[in-house]
Image: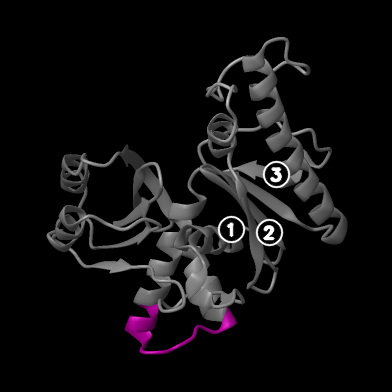
């Protein structure tokens, strides 16, 4: 059993893996380290990996050090990965984005993949069928957009993203919510449509805490997957364990295929 810890801007996600299969997920907020201890006691973990996009508290670092099995940290541009990172510089790429494209690559070997993560920010990340991560874009997420309308104006209220979203708002609240949420949806649809025209064999993975009902004809190529980041972390951990076992710096194609089948 292996443990992945994805530490994001809003919460931390713990996932237990048996081989390449996720077994259980637990989410915890800041100050809920007791959940980590409880989760670890439920499984016989042999190793783990964590990534973070925020500065960790000293208590969190101590909690990771105290775990009764080795934990590695994913560091962009430093940790060996089973894809080619073309970001400039590689160290500037967020580890959540890096893990997401690794997870998507192994889910759709031989295909180009676009990963869209709709959360605090909306990120668009593209990896080719040959395993080259070519880059991506970052856009404000729904909550950021709603807060911006409140902060940068004198009279617009802060609106919750959950609620009625008519085509045309009939109150200030519905006008803001509809404008933001429909704008997000159409932005995502635009990205997917443009990429499908350029890469006909493209697969799209949607992740993050916000679901969208997209109006796209090629829906059979679009998947919602809440585990895409943890699965990428798990793949990176497996890859590094294989490197350590074989004392090699790279895996050849046959070894990558074997790793995918574990």
Say if the magenta span includes residue 245.
yes
Depth order, front residue of 215/62 = 62
Q: CA distance from mark 2 to mark 1?
A: 7 Å
| Cβ atoms under marks 3 and 1 closer than 8 Å | no
Residue where numbered disc 1 is placed: 104
Question: At which x and y percent is residue 183?
Answer: 72, 34
Depth order, front residue of 157/136 = 157
* Mark 3 Cα-neighbour bin, 10 Å: few <14, some 14–19, many ≥20: some
View extreme (right): residue:
197
Query: Which residue is rendered at x = 52% and y = 67% of the image?
Result: 93
Query: Which residue is rendered at x = 39% and y = 82% of the image?
Result: 243
Depth order, front residue of 64/251 = 64
Task: Locate residue 166: give its quadrant.
Answer: top right
Q: Quadrant of the C terminus?
A: bottom left
Say if residue 195 shows up in the picture. yes
Looking at the image, residue 252 lies above or below residue 74: below
Q: CA distance from mark 3 to mark 2?
A: 10 Å
Mark with earlier residue (3, 1): 1
Task: Locate residue 155: give its quadrant.
Answer: top right
Question: At which x and y percent is residue 81?
Answer: 48, 75
Query: Which residue is rendered at x = 53% and y = 42% of the image?
Result: 119
**Seen in the image, is 259 located left or right of residue 215?**
left
Magenta stretch in the rendered image = 242-253
Question: At which x and y percent is residue 220?
Answer: 75, 41
Residue where numbered disc 3 is placed: 222
View extreme (front): residue:
154
């Amino acid at each position: 059993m292996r443990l992945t810890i994805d530490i994001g801007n809003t919460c931390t996600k713990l996932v237990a893996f048996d081989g390449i299969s996720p077994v259980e997920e637990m989410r915890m907020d800041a100050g809920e380290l007791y959940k980590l201890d409880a989760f670890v006691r439920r499984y016989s973990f042999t190793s783990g990996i964590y990534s973070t996009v925020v500065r960790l508290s000293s208590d969190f670092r101590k909690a990771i050090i105290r775990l009764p099995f080795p934990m590695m940290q994913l560091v962009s541009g430093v940790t060996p990965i089973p894809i080619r990172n073309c970001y400039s510089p590689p160290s500037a790429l967020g580890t959540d984005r890096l893990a997401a494209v690794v997870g998507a690559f192994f889910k759709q070997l031989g295909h180009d993949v676009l990963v869209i993560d709709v959360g605090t920010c909306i990120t668009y990340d593209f990896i080719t069928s040959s395993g080259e991560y070519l880059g991506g874009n970052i856009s404000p997420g729904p909550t950021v957009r709603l807060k911006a309308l409140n902060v940068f104006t004198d009279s617009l209220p802060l609106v919750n993203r959950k609620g009625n979203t008519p085509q045309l708002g009939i109150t200030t609240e519905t006008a803001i919510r509809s404008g933001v949420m429909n704008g997000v949806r159409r932005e995502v649809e635009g990205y997917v449509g443009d990429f499908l025209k350029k890469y006909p064999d493209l697969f799209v993975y949607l992740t993050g805490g916000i679901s969208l009902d997209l109006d796209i004809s090629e829906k059979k190529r679009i998947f919602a997957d809440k585990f895409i980041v943890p699965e990428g972390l798990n793949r990176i951990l497996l890859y590094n364990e294989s490197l350590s076992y074989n004392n090699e710096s790279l895996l050849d194609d046959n070894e990558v295929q074997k790793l995918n089948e574990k």
